[in-house]
Image (spheres, rainbow, N blue to C red):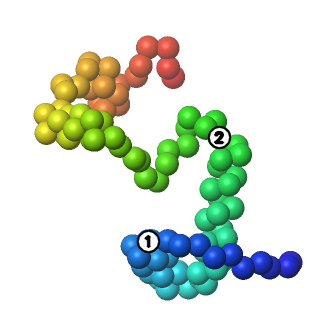
Amino acid sequence: MAESQISAFISDATKRKVERYAEAHGVKKGHLVEEALLHHLQALHELPADLVIPARLTLTAKSFDTVAKLLKKPRKPTKAMRDLMAGKAIDGEP
């Protein structure tokens, strides 16, 4: 199989994660990157766009403030959420 080289800028944190994983699992970094890209591209192709969760989220200042407030004072869980977390069956579900 013919090979091509690509160049990309990545964060230092991502680079460290790649290096740690490659060393721990005995794989070459190039192989790890290619497998990760293939996996990601396949997911983008096969899954509906609204099911693909980005690795990073960008928030406006206003939305960040909203998230921060919710983290400081979370809403009370609904009955449906409590039932779900308790493993109770949901109406109409097996």
- Tell me which residue sits at (28%, 41%) in the image: 61
Residue 89 in view in this figure = yes
Instruction: Please give left or right for residue 69 compared with residue 38 in the image.
Output: left
Q: Is residue 2 left or right of residue 11?
A: right
Could you say which is closer to the camera, residue 74 or residue 89? 74
Which label belongs to residue 47?
Answer: 2
Q: Is residue 21 visible?
A: no
User: In the picture shown, does residue 55 fall above or below 47?
Assistant: below
- Label 1 sits on a secondary structure element that is loop
Q: Residue at x 55, y 43 (%)?
A: 52
Quarter of the image for the N terminus: give it: bottom right
Q: Residue at x 44, y 71 (%)?
A: 11
- Classify 10 Å Cα crowding around label 1: few (below 14), some (14-19), many (20 and above): few
Please provide percent x and percent y for residue 66.
24, 34
Which residue in the structure is indicated by mark 1?
11
Q: Position of residue 84 (x, y in %)?
A: 34, 28
62 up-or-down from 57: above or below: above
Helix or strand or loop: what does disc 2 sit on?
Answer: loop
| Picture coordinates of residue 87, whole percent (x, y) | 35, 31
Q: Nearer the viewer, mark 1 or mark 2?
A: 1
Q: Is residue 48 above or below residue 36?
A: above
